[in-house]
Amino acid sequence: MQINGISGSSHRPREAQLAALLHSKPGRSADTLCSDMDPLAPWTKRTLNSRTGDLCRALSDDPHGNPYVPRRSAIDDPYVISEHVLCDWDKFQALAEQTLLNGPSDVAVLETALGLVRGRPFGAHLLPWIEAHAQEMITRIIDVAHTVAQWRTVPGPDRDLVAARQTVSVDLKVDNSAKLTGSGSSTPAETARACTPASHDSSKTTGPSTHPRNWRLSTSSRSCWTPPPSSLAPGK
């Protein structure tokens, strides 16, 4: 992970991890955050306060002048990040939840949700606090990809094999061992080979971008972080 649009500090990756932690699990104490950020060699409170200060300066203030990382007024106050800081996962869930109820007529909305995905959530090397959350994300993304692939391969006006193939490519980025358990119970790779575009009119393609994004945290005025293709190596 990295803070998007902000450079110049070797600590940016760790600030991005801290931002993800504060967003996913707000209200944690200093001791808990120090352990979460490095279970093998927990941060000191001085390191935590330094990284929190760096993150506060990097994200700056919202349009009303309030910092996106509020300053604590007492030493025992928990650490939080503004509720106005949102991530692509929030948007993914909002798009997917209602669309799955609406049915195939809104398949393009699910494809928009999948367009937010950019590989395996949080990369390959996960801190312990991320593991359960990352697995939940992977499961949900695969469910949505499965649904889109099914809807796009059913004969009818919404049939689009190129879009189905693009959906499978997103699934493979998230988990190349996943199974799309539709007809034939094929793996994503097998489904991708089956969704050949030879007979498809490419002018009608409505599939997601071939450069999906995942866990880009954003404020009302900017993108705050995006994960690079490779995962973050341990360290401070």
Image (spheres, rainbow, N blue to C red):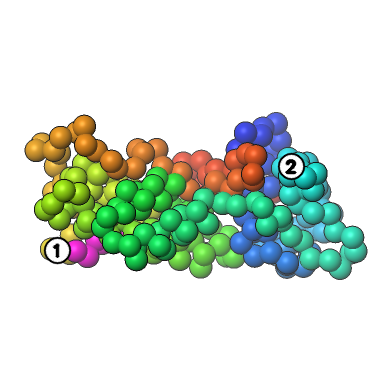
Q: Which residue is drawn at 14% across and 42% down?
A: 196
Q: Can residue 118 be seen in this view?
A: no
* 168 magenta-colored: no
Q: Above or below — where is 202 with respect to 126? A: above
Q: Which amino acid does label 2 sit on?
A: Pro
Residue stretch in magenta: 178-182
Query: Distance of mark 1 from mark 2, alpha carbons?
Result: 50 Å
Q: Above or below — where is 75 with respect to 115? A: below
Q: Residue at x 64, y 45 (%)?
A: 219
Choose top left, top right, bottom left or bottom right for residue 39: bottom right
Q: Which residue is drawn at 22% across and 65% down?
A: 181
Q: Residue furthest right?
A: 74
Q: How crowded is mark 2: few (under 14 residues within 10 Å), some or many (20 or more)?
A: few
Q: What element carries label 2?
A: loop
Q: What element carries label 1?
A: loop
Instruction: Check disc 1 and report the residue beneath it.
Output: 183
Query: Which mark is first along the chain, 2 or 1?
Result: 2
**Is residue 217 found left or right of 208 in the rendered image?**
right
